[in-house]
Amino acid sequence: MKKVTMSSVEKTKAPMTGGLMTGTQVWRQAILNPDDSTNFNFAIVAFDAGSRNKFHKHSGDQILIVTEGTGIVANDTESLTVTEGDVIVIPAGENHWHGAPDATSMAHITVTVKGSETEQTEA
């Protein structure tokens, strides 16, 4: 068993140039990273208004749980407005992006399986 107190988890800025993120600012708190005792990655990602990630895909399934604000999760053919309490399941290999590209911020929990790799599909 492991307890994590969010106030003790470092909140870091995601790189906004040359990486997966675009816009104003994105913050990340890595709660669990896969090691010998876990089978998944688990983090909170907070998007300031006007920020999102670029199109990308994961080699494993991804689960997003929106914890605050309003944002968008989109794939090549669909765009969903998401709010606090929404759960989104993104299958492995699905090209997608998520964030808060408009005037409101959004935060979500992200869960991916151990060993899942992320590939950016847009410059």
Image (cartoon, rainbow, N blue to C red):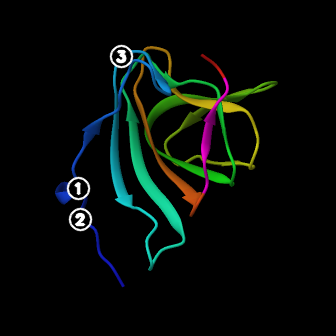
Amino acid type indicated by mark 1 = Val
- Residue 24 — which label? 3
Residue 98 painted magenta: no
Mark 3 residue crowding within 10 angstroms, few (<14) / some (14–19) / many (20+): some
Q: Residue furthest right?
A: 77
Instruction: Give whichever of discs 3 and 1 has the lower sequence position.
Output: 1
Nearer to the camera, 78 or 114: 114
| Disc 2 target residue | 5
Residue 118 painted magenta: yes
Per the image, label 3 sits on a secondary structure element best described as: loop
Q: Position of residue 84 (x, y in %)?
A: 49, 43
Mark in front: 2 vs 3 = 3
Labels 2 and 1 touching (C-beta < 8 A): yes
- Residue 64 — which label? none
| Disc 1 target residue | 9
First to last magenta residue range: 116-121
Labels 2 and 3 touching (C-beta < 8 A): no
Q: Position of residue 32 (x, y in %)?
A: 39, 63
Per the image, label 2 sits on a secondary structure element best described as: loop
From the viewer's perspective, is 59 left or right of 25? Answer: right
Q: Position of residue 87 (x, y in %)?
A: 61, 50
Amino acid type indicated by mark 2 = Thr
Instruction: Give whichever of discs 2 and 3 has the lower sequence position.
Output: 2
Q: Residue furthest bottom?
A: 1
Q: Position of residue 108 (x, y in %)?
A: 46, 44
Mark 2 residue crowding within 10 angstroms, few (<14) / some (14–19) / many (20+): few
Per the image, label 1 sits on a secondary structure element best described as: loop
CA gap between label 3 and label 1 equals 22 Å
